[in-house]
């Protein structure tokens, strides 16, 4: 795709990854909920593509980092820098290959379960 997208956290990010569309994940929550979640659970990534791949392949902006300046710093290169766009597209292709054509729901559930077990053990 010659375009990019932005999406809230959740299944939308997995859908854009499976369509191989470079995407910026933007998420926020009620400040108290965010503060409690940071204390109770340490997570580095919230996007399903990042969790499935075990590393950040889709840029994420959380809570107070969601500013016009930060969005522009990510989106402008995504749309104008051919190399950056290709890197993100290739990363989304890797998600699609990892998920495969059949049994993707089971693999997604397994990846999420593994992630939750790891975080619970910490």
Image: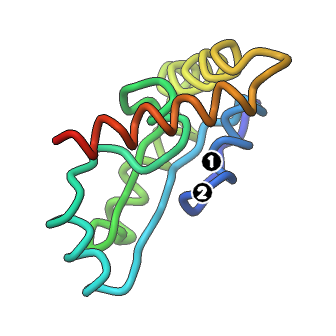
Vertical relation: 46 (above or below) 33:
above
Q: Which one is in front, 9 or 40?
A: 40
Q: Is residue 69 left or right of residue 41?
A: right
At horizontal 20% and vertical 76% (from top left) the residue drawn is 35
Q: Is residue 110 left or right of residue 68?
A: right
Q: Position of residue 21 (x, y in %)?
A: 69, 36
**On residue 76, which mark appears?**
none
Task: Give the residue at x 42% y 50%.
Answer: 46
Q: Which residue is under mark 2?
A: 10
**Above or below, 100 relative to 3:** above
Numbered circles on residues, count: 2
Residue at image x 50%, y 53%?
25
Q: Nearer the viewer, residue 25 or 35?
A: 35
Task: Locate residue 1: give its quadrant.
Answer: top right
Whether label 2 touches label 1, CB < 8 Å? yes
Crowding around mark 2 (Cα neighbors within 10 Å: few <14, some 14 to 19, many 20+) is some
Q: Quadrant of the C terminus?
A: top left
Report which quarter residue 91 is drawn in: top right
Q: Which residue is mark 1?
A: 13
Report helix, strand or loop for mark 1: helix
Placement of 26 over or under 57, stated as above or below: below
33 vs 122: above or below: below
How far is the residue under mark 2 from the one under mark 1? Answer: 6 Å
Q: Is residue 119 left or right of residue 16?
A: left
Alpha-carbon neighbours of circle 1 within 10 Å: few (<14), some, or many (≥20)? Answer: many
Colour scheme of the rendered structure: rainbow
> Where does residue 14 sit, x and y in percent of width and height?
66, 41
Q: Nearer the viewer, mark 2 or mark 1?
A: 2
Residue 5: image x %, image y %?
Answer: 65, 50
Secondary element type, mark 2: loop
Q: Residue at x 69, y 13 (%)?
A: 97
């Amino acid at each position: 795709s010659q375009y990019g997208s932005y999406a809230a956290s959740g299944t939308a990010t997995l859908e854009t990854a499976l369509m191989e569309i470079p995407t910026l994940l933007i998420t926020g929550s009620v400040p108290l909920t965010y503060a409690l979640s940071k204390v109770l659970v340490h997570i580095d990534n919230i996007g399903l593509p990042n969790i499935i791949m075990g590393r950040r392949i889709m840029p994420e902006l959380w809570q107070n980092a969601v500013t016009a300046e930060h969005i522009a710093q990510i989106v402008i290169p995504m749309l104008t820098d051919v190399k950056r766009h290709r890197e993100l597209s290739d990363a989304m292709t890797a998600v699609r290959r990892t998920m495969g054509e059949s049994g993707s729901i089971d693999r997604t559930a397994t990846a999420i379960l593994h992630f939750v077990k790891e975080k619970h053990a910490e």
